[in-house]
Image (tube, helix red, strand yellow):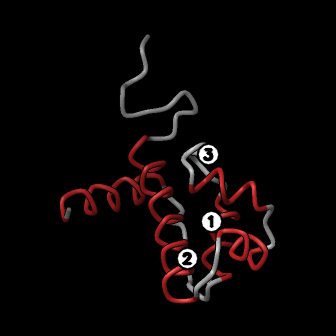
Amino acid sequence: MKKAKSQKKSGVPVEFTDWITEVCEEVYEYASDALGWSMKRLADNANLHPTTVYKILGGETRNPQALTVWKMAHAVGLEFWFLERTAEVQRAVAKKSEAA
């Protein structure tokens, strides 16, 4: 049985991985524009290895761990919460897509 195109091999919907990557990009944009931080400084303040941040923002890591995303957001003073249920995540992604 073939997997639907909306899912990666891991079973994580592509819409979610796109959204979570976009969140990371927005966190970095805020860190860069508002705080004048480099990717390295973001990584240092988030207590992450710089390569981790480079790979996420460079598109090599398509589905970063929740804790990694939270650390990045927290480092710049933003709050970030994941929804607990898959259905809620799917509804949130659908709403975001409709708004765009």
Q: Which quadrant of the structure image shows residue 65? A: bottom right
Residue underneath mark 3: 61
Q: Quadrant of the C terminus?
A: bottom left
Query: Which residue is identified by label 2?
Result: 80
Mark 2–mark 1 distance (CA, rounded to whole Å):
8 Å
Q: Is residue 73 left or right of residue 16?
A: right
Residue placed most toward the observer, 14 or 44: 44
Gap between marks 3 and 1 measured at Cα? 12 Å
Do residues under tags 2 and 1 come within 8 Å of each other at their CB atoms? yes
Mark 3 Cα within 10 Å, few/some/many (few <14, many 20+)?
A: some
Q: Secondary structure at mark 3?
A: loop
Question: Which residue is drawn at the image coordinates 37% and 34% (left, top)?
Answer: 6
Precedes in sequence: disc 2 or disc 3: 3
Q: Quadrant of the N terminus?
A: top left
Q: Secondary structure at mark 2?
A: loop
Q: Which residue is label 1 attached to?
A: 69
In the rendering, at what x and y percent does residue 35 appear? 57, 89
